[in-house]
Image: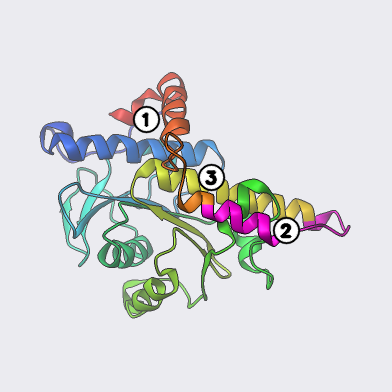
Amino acid sequence: MSSPAFKVVKPVREQVSKEEWDVRVNLAAAYRLTEMFNMTELTANHISARVPGTTDQFLLNPYGMLYDEVTASSLIRIDINGKILFNATEYPVNEAGFVIHSAIHAARHDVDCIAHTHTPAGMAVSAMKCGLLPLAQSFVRFQDIAYHEWEGIATEGRMDERERLVRDLGNKEAMILKNHGLLTCGPSIPWAFNLMHRLERACITQIMTMSCNTPFDLPPQDAVATFTEMLANPAPGRPRTGDIPWRALLRRLDRQQPDYKN
C-alpha cells in the first residue's frame, strides 16, 4: 500500500514531545482498530485525543485518508478555535469533526479522547424511538446514555450546535446522536475505544434481538441498579480503563499493521 503524501522532510517524531508522540501512536492504533472491527464509513468520522499538557489542543485525522492509512505522523494538531498548529500531510481537517470534537474538548477537561462512528447498527438504533435497550449484561452500562437530536451536518456554519451538543452529553461517557451515529469519550484512548466497541456490540445485539420477532426480557431493575453501582465504584484491581484489552489489541496490530507507529 502506498503511503499518503507528506509535506515535511524531518520526521514528525523529532518535532513533537515524547508525550505527544505516545498519544499519536495510541490514537493511530485506535483508527486502525476501528477499521479492523468494521466501524468505519470510508473517509468519514473521527477520533480525537487531547495533546498532553494542554486544555485547548487536540489531534484529529486528516480528511481524505482511510482509517487504515492513518499513522502517528499523519495526525493533525488543531486548537479549539480551529487553528491548525501542526499538519505534516497535504490533507485538510474534517470540518464536521472539528465542530463536534472541539465542543467536547473545550467543555470537558476530564475527557482526553472522543470517538464518533456512523455504523449501520449505530445509525439504526439512533433512529429507534425506544433508544438503546439494556438487553444483556455487557450493555447495562449504557442504560443512562445521552441523546442529541439531529440538526443537520455539523459544519462551521452551525457552530451554535456545540452548546446543545455539550449540554446533552452532560457528564456522560456515551451518546447516541439521533438519526446520525454513536459517540463515546473518556480520560484515555483505551477507555473511549473500549466503550465504542461495547456500544457498537450493544446496537448489533439490539437489532438481532428485535429482528427475531419474539418477546424478550429486560434485566430486573434491582440487578441493574446493583451493576450500575459496581461500575461506579469498581473493586480494587478491576479498573474500567480498557487498558487490559488495549494491550492485547496493540499486540495484534504490531503483528498485522506495525506501520501505524510510523
Label 1 element class: loop
Left or right of residue 110: residue 84: left
CB under 8 Å between discs 1 and 2:
no
Q: Amino acid at mark 1?
A: Ser
Q: Dividing the picture into quarters, in which one does residue 72 lie?
A: top left
Q: Nearer the viewer, residue 138 or 16?
A: 138
Q: Which mark is residue 2?
A: 1
> Percent position (x, y) of residue 159?
32, 76
Q: CA distance from mark 3 to mark 1?
A: 29 Å
**Where are the magenta residues, as a range?**
210-229
> Percent position (x, y) of residue 112?
30, 51
Label 3 element class: helix
- Of tags 3 and 1, the one toward the viewer is 3
Q: Dividing the picture into quarters, in which one does residue 109 lie?
A: bottom left
Q: Amino acid at mark 3?
A: His
At 79% from the left edge and 58% from the top edge, which residue is drawn?
Answer: 210
